[in-house]
Amino acid sequence: MSDLTQVPSAISGNTKHAVIARALMQDIVSRKYPVGTQLPSEPELALSLGVSRQTIRVALRHLRDLGLIAGAQGVGSFVKAGAPSTRLGYTFDSIRDLLQYANDTQVRMISRREITLTGEQATWLDRKPGEVWWEVHTVRVSPDSVSPIASSIILLPYVFGQVLTEVEKSSEAIFSLIERRMGESITEIVQNICIAFADELHAHALGVATGEAMMCMERRYFGRNGDLLEVSRTLHPADRFQYGMRVRVQSGQDSQFQR
């Protein structure tokens, strides 16, 4: 592989797939694999680099998220661009991906306060009016940019407030802190994506104009007994973040794609 000293720090971490992704990215940036050419197959890369095919698949996914390659398993990967996209991209298909997102970005807490749920908030959360919760405002920044890629309002029951002292120290996701510190287990995550317009709070945090269209991602985290442990509502500027999702179809199952 090529000298890694010139690799842009678009992929952080020391996991095997991150190291492999950076090596392949340098090969693309240095034009060992020019735009339009095909990368070696997954088995060839796994053999030459001494890692599993699963590690290669995850590394290639990093490159797809950065807009460097296109293609899919079974088809082959072709070089799409000679430099990473300026937007931070993530593909989420498991709780591990959410944890990786937290590890790869830096969190800054803007504010935290106790709130008493109003009737409207209680209806939204399917809770009782008068309950005391924590409301936390955070921003996340990628290692390669000073501009935040996300502004989040996070709500969690009052009893979990003790985990908030660790948020900025570790950059760990709040739901992960709840699991580790409070003995809870996240058993279900419900996610909804829509378009929202930045209000004054988010606009100031993200450095955008009030009313600008944003990608809005709302996640609800549920515990073993179906209890709501956390709700996050996150706004992403379109030019700084992209979202991907992978859906696996089990072989042998009926599918409209097989008709």
Image: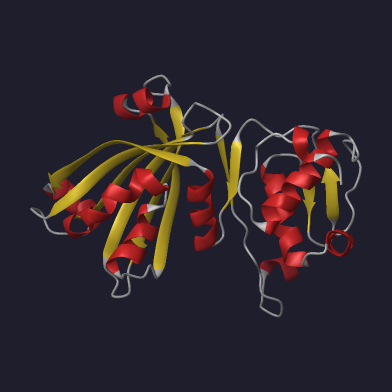
Which residue lies at the image location 39% right of the left edge and 59% below the top edge? 176
In depth, the one of 95 and 176 nearer the eye is: 176
Q: Name the side, left or right, on which 115 lies relative to 28.
A: left
Quadrant in which residue 16 is drawn: bottom right
The colour scheme used here is secondary structure
Which residue is outermost to the top?
209
Q: How many marks are shown on the rendered structure?
A: 0
Rendering coords of residue 81 (x, y %): 79, 34
Quadrant containing the C terminus in the rendered view: bottom right
Q: Residue at x 48, y 49 (%)?
A: 102
One can see residue 259 in this view: no
Check the image and name the residue furthest to the bottom. Answer: 252
Q: In the figure, is residue 221 to the left or right of 238?
A: left
Q: Is residue 164 visible?
A: yes
The image position of residue 50, as x and y in percent, is: 82, 64
The picture places residue 226, in percent across and down from the top left corner, at 30, 71
Quadrant housing residue 17: bottom right
Residue beneath the point at 91% across and 42% down = 37
What residue lies at 30% left-to-right and 24% top-to-bottom? Answer: 200
Residue sitting nearer the eye, 247 or 186: 186
Outermost residue, left side: 130
Q: Where in the figure is residue 220, as x and y percent of width and height? A: 35, 57
Against 231, is 202 above or below? above
Quarter of the image where one finds residue 204: top left
Q: Is residue 128 found left or right of 103 in the rendered image?
A: left
Q: Is residue 229 above or below residue 110?
A: below
